Amino acid sequence: MPTVSRDDLQRVLGELDDPKLIDILALDPSLGDLEEAVVVATGDHDLLAKRGHGVSPTAVRIAEILSADEDEKDSPAGPGR
């Protein structure tokens, strides 16, 4: 299976900051993992399930990396808030 490049990541996932790119590349994802991650990140993972296709653990981890900023925005800014 061919290695996914930085260009592949940006083509499928859009512009990402370097830490996210590095974290995702470290997972050694396939192009299919990237495409699944987009579906999961947009909340359409039921679409895959309806087609009888489970989501790979790598795609789930990529979706977690992509949504990390959103999780931080939703959490309190500091202790005691």
Image (tube, helix red, strand yellow):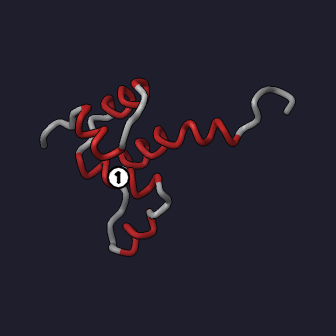
Is 42 situated above or below 80?
below
**Residue 34 percent location from the top left of the image:** 31, 47
> Where is mark 1, residue-wise?
56
Residue 70 placement: quadrant? top right
User: What's the amino acid at mark 1?
Assistant: Ser
Count of marks placed on residues: 1
When the figure is inspected, residue 46 is found, relative to residue 71, above or below; the finding is below
Outermost residue to the bottom: 50
Asked whether, in this view, residue 81 is left or right of residue 58, the answer is right
Residue 40: name its quadrant: bottom left
- Residue at the image position 23 percent from the left and 40 percent from the top: 8
Mark 1 element type: loop
Q: Quadrant of residue 2?
A: top left
Quarter the C terminus occupies: top right
Please tell me which residue is depicted at 78% across the width and 27% down the height of the picture. 78
Point 27% across, 35% down: residue? 28
